[in-house]
Amino acid sequence: MTTEQLEKPFRVVIPARYGATRLPGKPLIQIGGKPLIAWVWERASASAADQVLVATDDSRIAETCADFGAEVVMTRADHRSGSERIAEVAEARGWAAEEIVVNLQGDEPGISPQLIDQVARGLAQHPDAGLSTLACPLEEAALLFDPHVVKVITDCNGYALYFTRAPVPWHRDEFLRDRTRLPGGVPFLRHIGLYAYHAGFLVRYLNWPASPLEQAESLEQLRVLWHGERIHVSLAETLPGPGVDTSDDVYRVTRWLEANQ
């Protein structure tokens, strides 16, 4: 680990709820002999974070996390996003405004500790941003047109212009002729849902109303752009493993974890 990585300490909070729309009880699904949330907690614990917390509103998740040694914070049940849940934690714990908090979603057992460190470092290096996140090159046309894959467009300095489920950038001429391959010379980027914020930003975020764009696309980061804050996007130093979104993902993630332990 470099000195640069150690300059700014940070915490990781893993928001976890039981009532996922597409896969209820997702954090407790057994993968490779242990619950999904345990895999995610272990990834976070292997990072340079000073503290790792699980934030949930469900006693079943809290009890399971306590069994494998995770520190748990109980939160309200009415949060619309993981960022809102983490904002409650930051406010309740009285964290200083400048403290860095990483949001690691509870369905990402394949995330690399290296990426957790990278997103925290990205915020430390771009203090003018409200938050930092990551992206990786998108190289398959099928993924570009998949609404479950979130795309991001950035400016020349790596600040986000927009996040969307739609296929962007749209190559006007090439896509009229062929949508089975991606045109060359276009920066197609897939968003990686890993965020770092300052605790003071999270308190502001908690007080903002949801934006129309956020509600339309079901993407919480659009609230940040709507309210005029900047989001810095770094290219991921390594590719993340698969996440669990639907029941079909469980087998795929299980095989990936067996091959990469």
Image (tube, rainbow, N blue to C red):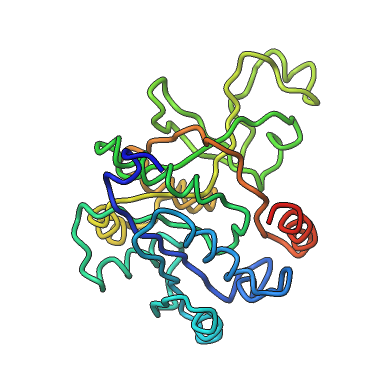
**Rendered view: 43 above or below 129:** below
How far from the left and from the top, in percent, is residue 62? 49, 82
How many callouts does the rendering have?
A: 0
**Left or right, residue 85 beside residue 127:** right
State the quadrant of the C terminus.
bottom right
Front residue (pair 135, 205)? 135
Front residue (pair 47, 141)? 47
Front residue (pair 57, 62)? 62
How far from the left and from the top, in percent, is residue 22? 68, 66
How far from the left and from the top, in percent, is residue 77? 44, 78
The answer to whether residue 228 is seen in the rendering is no
The structure residue drawn at horizontal position 70% and vertical position 17%, both measured from the top left corner, is 183
How far from the left and from the top, in percent, is residue 126? 29, 35
State the quadrant of the N terminus.
top left
**Left or right, residue 37 beside residue 50:** right
**Rendered view: 160 above or below 179:** below
The structure residue drawn at horizontal position 34% and vertical position 56%, both measured from the top left corner, is 101
Residue 187 location, quadrant: top right
**Left or right, residue 90 beside residue 66:** left
**Rendered view: 33 above or below 181:** below
